[in-house]
Amino acid sequence: MIDIIFMGGLVVFSISSLYFFFNRHKPEGLNTAFLVSFVTIASYVLMWDGFFAVESPAGQPIFWSRWLFYVVSCSLLMLEIGRAKGITSTGKVAELVFLNTIVMVTGTVSAVTSGWTKWLFFAISAIAYLILIIPLLRVRDGDSNWIDKYILLGWSGFPVVFFLAPTGIGLFGSAVAMGLYLLLDIYTKIAFNLQLKA
């Protein structure tokens, strides 16, 4: 089942990569929509290969490389979210990218460790995430308020799945987690970029 989910992700993000490559919103600017989809293809190939997967104490596979690729793809998304929210200061944009990197790297460490170390890194990741999104949600601009639903329903779904999956308390297995992550990836990377470019 997990292989089918990974193949589905490869197909979906291959199609979105082609679409965003040939339908650039601003020909002279950075094509972040294409780059996000393209990086996600690489992530799904590596997870499908399973080389970097580790096992949870319950014997479930944990595909921790996902969060390392999120350092790149979600940092690109942060650039777009910041721009849409009117955050133009180079320092503030760098802070968004840096905080995103902390969230993803500490999430990676949490995924591959156990005991108090796992939960300490999960807490650091969660705190960095809150520091990242709360200022974004406080920006009340009529033209960018639509982004809040992607942050609240999409971005915030990832740590919930992480906590409930084998990376956390193991309430459900890896196949369910991978399916949920794929849906969240589609929502936050494809649906978001389609609406952003509309």
Image (spheres, rainbow, N blue to C red):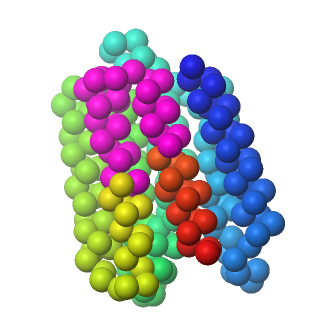
**What is the magenta segment's predominant secondary structure?**
helix
Q: Quarter holding the C terminus?
A: bottom right
Q: Quarter holding the N terminus?
A: top right
Q: 34 or 62: which is nearer to us? A: 34
Query: On the picture, is 44 further left or further right than 105?
Result: right
Q: Give the magenta range.
A: 154-183
> Is residue 90 placed above or below 176 in the rendered structure?
below
Q: 116 or 79: which is nearer to us? A: 79
Q: Is residue 175 located in the magenta-colored stretch of the structure?
A: yes
Q: Residue at x 58, y 65 (%)?
A: 193
Is residue 99 visible in this depiction of the protein? Answer: no
Query: On the picture, is 43 further left or further right than 139?
Result: right
Estimate the x, y position of residue 179 in percent, counting from the top left.
Answer: 49, 33
Q: Residue at x 41, y 48 (%)?
A: 105
> Is residue 29 placed above or below 73 in the rendered structure?
below
Q: Is residue 113 located in the magenta-colored stretch of the structure?
A: no
Q: Residue at x 30, y 42 (%)?
A: 160
